[in-house]
Amino acid sequence: MESQSVVLTIAVYMAFFSLGVAFLSTLYRLFKGPDITDRLIVLDLSASTLIGLVIMIIITTGETVYLNVALIAALVMFMGNIAFARYLKKSLRK
Amino acid sequence: MIDTIVAILLLFASFFTLVAALGIIRLPDVYMRMHAITKASSLATILFLVALIFAHPTWRVALGSLLLIAFVIATAPISTHALARISVQLGIKLTKGMVRNDMKTNTTTDDEATDKFAEKTNLD
């Protein structure tokens, strides 16, 4: 946006800050998590953090093409979680 | 006016993102972490997308955002449910101090219950 108000600028900075904190917390849980499903549920929060970052980029720059990136990120999150769940189920059966 | 609406929506979305981050760090159990992550981050994603619709009111952005909202609402409970079910079947313990566990018979030590559970849900 070319002429955005002060309130929107403050809100944009707050959103970038909270998305950064969420990403650092996913990294913490990814390295520390005791079980494998602890490391897998991180994928959910990291995908939604990525969607939020892409939306913040769209709002600040005005390039609406990047909405496809958010769609693909949501798709990859869902497929990855389902595939990991089925893989764990198959390894449980042996 | 539009800027103020977008700013309020972005502030609420940042608040729920921070709640999800706090939940994934502080909660003691994998099931509690799933509960925190799924609800808070889905709501944060939906609020970000509504803010995007208000910020760029074109048909293309609105259609893509509504598609993404529907996708998030449909898929986040499914994937979290699959992971919760597999972590019950792997035998991951609840935290200490929990007084009730309804899924006690579905751990890996009880093979018959697991087989019956898988047969009923018919995913294998």
Image (cartoon, coloured by chain):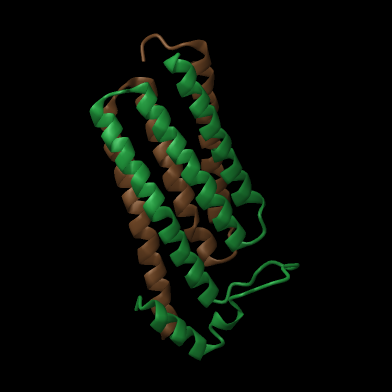
Chain colours: A brown, B green
B75 above or below B56? below
Quick one: which residue is furthest to the bottom in this view? B112
Quick one: which residue is furthest to the top in this view? A3
Q: In which quarter of the image is residue B18?
A: top right
| Residue closer to the observer: A19 or B79 | B79
Q: Can residue B107 be seen in this view?
A: no
Percent x, y for residue A18? 55, 34
B116 above or below A22? below
User: How many numbered callouts?
Assistant: 0
Percent x, y for residue A3? 40, 9
| Residue closer to the observer: B70 or B18 | B70
B9 above or below A37? above
Quick one: which residue is furthest to the right in this view? B97
At x 43%, y 36%, the residue is A52
Percent x, y for residue B108? 53, 83
At x 56%, y 87%, the residue is B109
Instruction: Name the side, left or right, on which B102 lies relative to A50.
Output: right
Instruction: Name the side, left or right, on which A56 lies relative to A19.
Output: left
Quadrant containing the C terminus of chain B is bottom left
Q: Is residue B7 visible?
A: yes
Quadrant containing the N terminus of chain B is top left
At x 65%, y 73%, the residue is B101
At x 40%, y 77%, the residue is B121
Q: Quadrant of residue B60?
A: top left
Instruction: Name the side, left or right, on which B97 lies relative to A8.
Output: right
Percent x, y for residue B3? 45, 16
